[in-house]
Image (tube, rainbow, N blue to C red):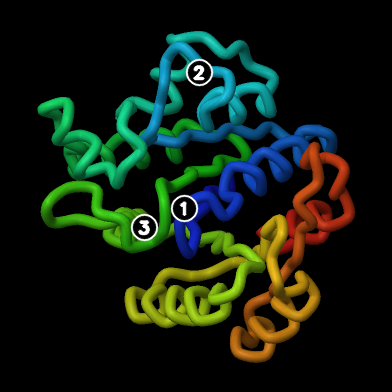
Amino acid sequence: MTAIFVTATGTDVGKTFVTTGLIRHLRAQGRKVDAIKPVVSGFDPDHAAAADPGVLLRALGRPVELAEIARMSPWRFRAPLAPDLAAAREDRSVEFNKLIEFSRQSIAAASDTLFIEGVGGIMVPLDDRHTVLDWMTVLRIPALLVTGSYLGTISHTLTALHVLAQRNVEVSAIVVSETSGSSVTLPDTITTIARFAVPIEVIGIPRVPHPDLADPAFRQLATLL
């Protein structure tokens, strides 16, 4: 059984895009795949199909229904803010110990490959004391670090790698998900990050309309997990 934590240098850089692409690729190979995204901010139940849990469920071939969404994402908040702030607006909280328990139970129940998709970037606060990095540190499973090709991403990525190394979090690969309209090219971003990230493999994925269209990149990425 393989469990991978999909994290990122920040929000909206392509975690769900990369996760769904890997799910589709592995399912096409006959693999049994599951995914959870325990914490979600900016969730509108009236547009659940467009939210990250809905996108992941479609990739898994499951119905976008409330029961399925609740199974995948127990902590859902309406405000598009960091989880601690979004939860506070609803007089709720992300109970860190319960989050860890839920994650571990999901790992134990997985028969083949499980993706745990984080929320925002690695240092996003979950409550008043814990961040996504703390979550990853406790679980001790390999991480897939997703970043963009925007101007500034090299500093963000290398900083994230440094922090992850300090916590002894293994990074299986770095994925550069292309940023639309960036002044920096995807190949230049990959080349520079790779120079500083040795021996971690750096894979570039063009931002195409459908993840399965970038199949060669996902095939290469899947071999590293």
Relative height, residue 132 to residue 176 (above, below) = above
Q: Distance of mark 3 from mark 1, alpha carbons?
A: 17 Å
x and y, in percent, of residue 223 in the image: 76, 59
On the image, numbered disc 1 is attached to which residue? 11
- Please name whichever residue, 104 or 14, is drawn nearer the observer in this view of the structure: 14
In this rendering, the answer to whether 186 lies above or below 140 is below
Would you say the residues marked 2 and 1 are in contact, meaning their CB atoms lie under 8 Å apart? no
- Quadrant housing residue 122: bottom left
Q: N-terminal of the two: label 3 or label 1? A: 1
Circle 1 sits in a helix, a strand or a loop, which is it? Answer: loop
For the residues bearing labels 2 and 3, Cβ distance under 8 angstroms: no
Q: Please, what is the three-letter code of the amino acid marked with disc 1? A: Thr
Q: Which mark is residue 150?
A: none
Q: Would you say 207 lies left or right of 197 here? A: right
Local crowd at mark 3 within 10 Å, few (<14), some, or many (≥20)? many
Distance between mark 2 and mark 3 Cα atoms: 26 Å
Residue in the image at 66% along x and 48% along y: 18
Say whether disc 2 or disc 3 marks the residue closer to the N-terminus.
2
Query: Residue 136 — which label?
Result: 3
